[in-house]
Image (spheres, rainbow, N blue to C red):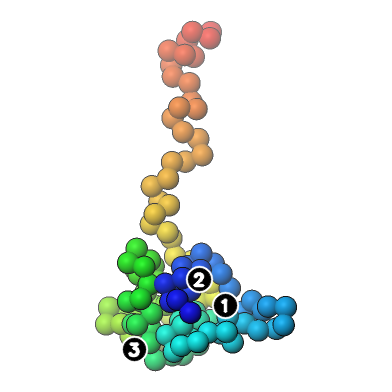
Amino acid sequence: NRVDLVALLLLCNAHPGTTSQDGRTPLDLAEGPVVKALLTRWAGGDVDAGALRAAISEANPLDRPRLAAALTIDGQGRPEEPGHAALAPPHVPDQRSASLPSSRSAAAAPSSAQAAAVA
């Protein structure tokens, strides 16, 4: 029941409605109001804003902005109006992957000198 790990799994597209072989969901297994609130809100349910603030504060500092955006938290730590954003699952760009090189790098393209040497 570590909030930081639950938040990370959700941000990596883990689905809170997945069931185990015996039919239990992550919410069934959650022990604690903060984890339960996080899972409930992620699935689109209404929860206490204080529990959501606690979930965000217990998340990894690098994940907090994405988590707050995914949970549709306004600047005051309150859930925005219901229906503002779909939460099953949210699509929030990962800022850490934005700086990765594209699949075709400059090294793969021949330089003009190399092209002239081949011709």
Please give the residue where the numbered disc 3 appears in the rendered image. 50
Mark nearer the N terminus (1 vs 3): 1
Label 1 and label 3: CA atoms lie apart by 21 Å
Asked if the residues shown at circle 1 and circle 2 are in contact, with their CB atoms under 8 angstroms apart, the answer is: yes
Q: Which residue is more in the foreground, 117 or 62?
A: 62
Please give the residue where the numbered disc 1 appears in the rendered image. 16
Mark nearer the N terminus (1 vs 2): 2
Please give the residue where the numbered disc 2 appears in the rendered image. 10
Q: Secondary structure at mark 3?
A: helix
- Work out whether 55 lies above or below 61: below
Q: Secondary structure at mark 1?
A: loop
Q: Which residue is more in the foreground, 12 or 82?
A: 12
Mark nearer the N terminus (2 vs 3): 2
Label 1 and label 2: CA atoms lie apart by 8 Å
Which of the 4 quarters of the picture holds residue 23?
Answer: bottom right
Amino acid of disc 2:
Leu
Which of the 4 quarters of the picture holds residue 3?
Answer: bottom left
- Work out whether 82 lies above or below 112: below
Amino acid of disc 1:
Pro
Tell me the crowding category of disc 2: few under 14, some 14 to 19, or many 20 or more residues within 10 angstroms, Cα based: many
